[in-house]
């Protein structure tokens, strides 16, 4: 693994420690470079993590002032809600047995210039500003990540529809990968954490109103965007 990328990950970890020293808790994580054109963009199998502040975890029906986020975008992402700690040598099966699933959004903030180096993007928390999580459900026995289809609507207007197959890493493999990587940097994937696992649809600078993400077999989540 490129040492410069790992050094950038350590810089991000030091930001986490600084926030915690200020009394700002970390409520979850993201795994980057898992979907679309970004997959393997920094090397085959390289999946950096980012963190989610507890005070920026919104829930279904919540409201966010976009003036706090802009410039940025809203992305449909499956949200994983941890039901137990995942430590040791974690497998995809371990991950599947330890989670609930929820519809979700990531709220990304474009804090860096377009030509920023990959190391800066990692250290800058992979653009995360916050997330939105719907109601969690236990993993259905017959549910497979690759069968999922995800759409995003603004009111009644469909903005995008994306199928998981061929677009995104297997979500349980992603959780296992995240759990194992976090441990290398002195952190862990713990019970109660919220995790987002990669983008489906993306909308830049969303217009005010209600935005809904629909995840087949899982459910929906809605957030109200205000000015």
Image (cartoon, helix red, strand yellow):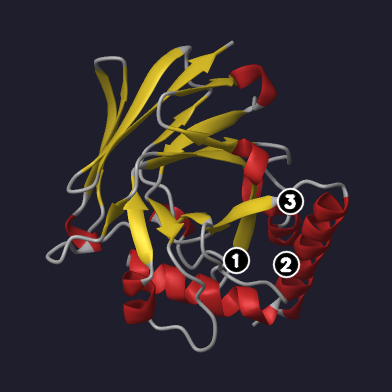
How far separated are the C-alphas under marks 3 and 1?
Answer: 12 Å
| Residue at point 53%, 59% (across, down) | 32
Labelled pair 1, 2 in contact (Cβ < 8 Å): yes
Left or right of 178? Residue 3 is: right
Q: Residue at x 59, y 31 (%)?
A: 72
Q: Is residue 109 left or right of residue 203?
A: right
| Residue drawn at (41%, 24%) of the image | 61
The residue where tag 3 is placed is 124
Crowding near the residue tagged with mark 2, few <14, some 14–19, many ≥20 C-alpha atoms within 10 Å? many
The image position of residue 197, as x and y in percent, is 44, 57
Q: Residue at x 64, y 79 (%)?
A: 183
Q: Which residue is mark 2?
A: 9
Identify residue for label 1: 48
Instruction: Say whether disc 1 or disc 2 marks the residue closer to the N-terminus.
Output: 2
Image quarter of residue 4: bottom right
Quarter containing the N terminus: bottom right
Element carrying mark 3: loop
N-term-proximal mark, 3 vs 1: 1
The correct choice, above or below, for 16 with respect to 212 in the image is below
Give 42 or 172, whichever is nearer the viewer.
172
Under tag 1, what secondary structure?
loop
Q: Residue 139's x, y, as percent?
A: 25, 61
Q: Is residue 113 above or below residue 197?
A: above
Q: CA distance from mark 1 to mark 2?
A: 7 Å
Q: Residues within 10 Å of mark 1 (few under 14, many from 20)?
A: many
Along the line of sight, which residue is nearer the eye, 68 or 82? Answer: 82
């Amino acid at each position: 693994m490129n040492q410069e990328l790992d050094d950038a990950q350590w810089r991000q970890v030091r930001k986490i420690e600084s926030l915690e020293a200020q009394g700002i808790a970390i409520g979850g994580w993201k795994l980057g470079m898992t979907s679309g054109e970004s997959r393997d963009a920094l090397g085959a199998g390289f999946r950096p993590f980012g963190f989610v502040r507890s005070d920026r975890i919104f829930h279904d029906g919540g409201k966010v002032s976009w003036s706090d986020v802009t410039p940025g975008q809203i992305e449909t992402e499956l949200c994983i809600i941890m039901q137990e700690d995942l430590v040791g040598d974690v497998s995809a099966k371990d991950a599947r047995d330890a989670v609930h699933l929820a519809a979700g959004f990531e709220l990304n903030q474009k804090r860096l210039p377009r030509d920023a180096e990959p190391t800066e993007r990692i250290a800058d928390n992979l653009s995360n500003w916050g997330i939105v999580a719907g109601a969690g459900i236990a993993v259905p026995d017959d549910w497979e990540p690759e069968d999922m289809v995800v759409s995003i609507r603004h009111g009644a207007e469909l903005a995008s529809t994306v199928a998981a197959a061929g677009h995104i890493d297997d979500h349980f493999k992603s959780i296992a990968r995240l759990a194992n990587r976090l441990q290398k940097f002195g952190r862990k994937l713990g019970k109660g954490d919220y995790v987002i696992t990669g983008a489906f649809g993306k909308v830049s600078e969303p217009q005010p109103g209600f935005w809904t993400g629909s995840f087949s077999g899982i459910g929906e989540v809605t957030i109200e965007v205000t000015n």
